[in-house]
Amino acid sequence: MATTDISNNPPARVPGTADLRLFLTDVDGTLTDGGMYYGSDGTEFKKFNTRDGMGLQMLQRTGVKVGIVTSENTPINVNRARKLGLDYLKQSARDGGKLAAVREICDEMGITLQQVAYVGDDVNCYDLLAAVGWAACPADACGKVRGIPGIHILERRGGDACVREWIDMILAK
């Protein structure tokens, strides 16, 4: 599994968010609309919403670590994570690998899964969403994910600033 840890700053509590220490998101179908765009030369493109990026940076400024956990492994994800200055990027997290990847981060940070927020949209996010303390999904997430007990179903669809919606709700608490 490919991992990029971009920061060594210790996590801090966010006022009003209890023990939230780590906020993570999926990419395809969450930070993007889930579409796969290819140029005639095979170049892959993804469309990200700048409001999501701003939300991640706002949350990070409060001391919460932020990052991406995705099944994909693309330079696009590395570029986006670097541009935003995210703390973590875990790629190639397949077949239960998302939960395992987040457990590794939790061990490194000395926190529990209950101190983690994750937003994801599809069956490969299910185990992680069911395990974290703060689970959310876009409005257009698959039925299995929307059926997770206690999950917050956002009003916005993937790629339409749904991550920012969740962050704004967290920061308002």
Image (cartoon, rainbow, N blue to C red):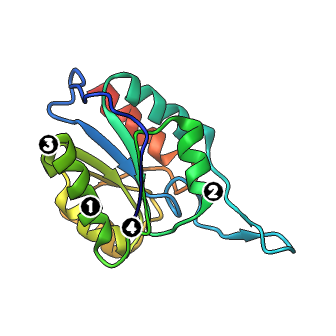
Q: Nearer the viewer, residue 49 or 82?
A: 82
Q: Residues within 10 Å of mark 4 (few under 14, many from 20)?
A: few
Q: Nearer the viewer, mark 4 or mark 2?
A: 4
**For marks 4 and 3 on the same chain, the one whose residue lies earlier in the sequence:** 4
Q: What is the x, y in percent for residue 25?
A: 41, 52
The residue pinned by badge 2 equals: 76
Q: Nearer the viewer, mark 4 or mark 1?
A: 4
Mark 4 vs mark 1, CA separation in Å: 19 Å
The residue pinned by badge 3 equals: 111
Q: Nearer the viewer, mark 3 or mark 1?
A: 3
**For marks 4 and 1 on the same chain, the one whose residue lies earlier in the sequence:** 4
17 lies left or right of 156: left
Mark 1 vs mark 2, CA separation in Å: 24 Å
Tally of marks:
4
Could one spot residue 32 in this view of the protein? Answer: yes
| Amino acid of disc 1 | Leu
| Residue at left offset 85%, top offset 73% | 41
The residue pinned by badge 4 equals: 1
